[in-house]
Amino acid sequence: MASAIRGSRVGAGPMGEAERGDSIARAYVSYWCARGHEVRPSFAVEETVVIPAEWDCPKCGYPAGRDRNNPPSPEVNVPYKTHLAYVKERRTDAEGEKLLEEALRKLRGDDEE
């Protein structure tokens, strides 16, 4: 008895271009990051396709641009500041000591008001 799927295996994909459909024209665009990595994603060649100015580098995560000699600089992540850090930006140590003394006087009941 002959098998209808002779010469094929379970899980085999399409047999050729006709079964997959026509492939669309693609354009490869080069992007470079600050570390010198080149990324070449492909985009469909159509009027409606917008090619982005920047692309994330898959090797280092830096942003990559289309100008090899002038890649975009990576974003600087400012670490989380505590409440105390913000207070120290607004007040000098002398002002802090004065406020502390006033608050302690009020707590002790030494306030003359």
Image (cartoon, helix red, strand yellow):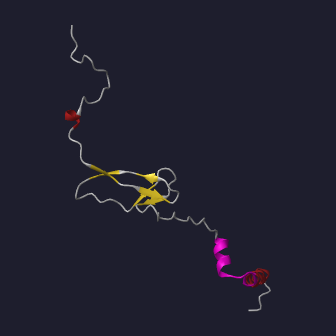
**Which residue is painted at 44% across and 61% down in the image?**
68
Name the outermost residue toward the bottom. 113
Q: Quadrant of the N terminus?
A: top left
On whether residue 67 falls in the magenta region, the answer is: no
Q: Say which quarter of the image contains residue 104.
A: bottom right
Residue 51 at x, y = what percent? 32, 59
Q: Is residue 50 above or below residue 86?
A: above
Name the outermost residue toward the front. 69
Residue 97 at x, y = what percent? 76, 82
Residue 41 at x, y = what percent? 37, 51
**Which residue is painted at 56% across and 64% down in the image?**
77
Q: Say which quarter of the image contains residue 64.
A: bottom left
Point out the stretch of residues depicted in magenta. 83-96
Q: Say which quarter of the image contains residue 111.
A: bottom right
Residue 5 at x, y = what percent? 24, 18
Q: Is residue 75 left or right of residue 51?
A: right
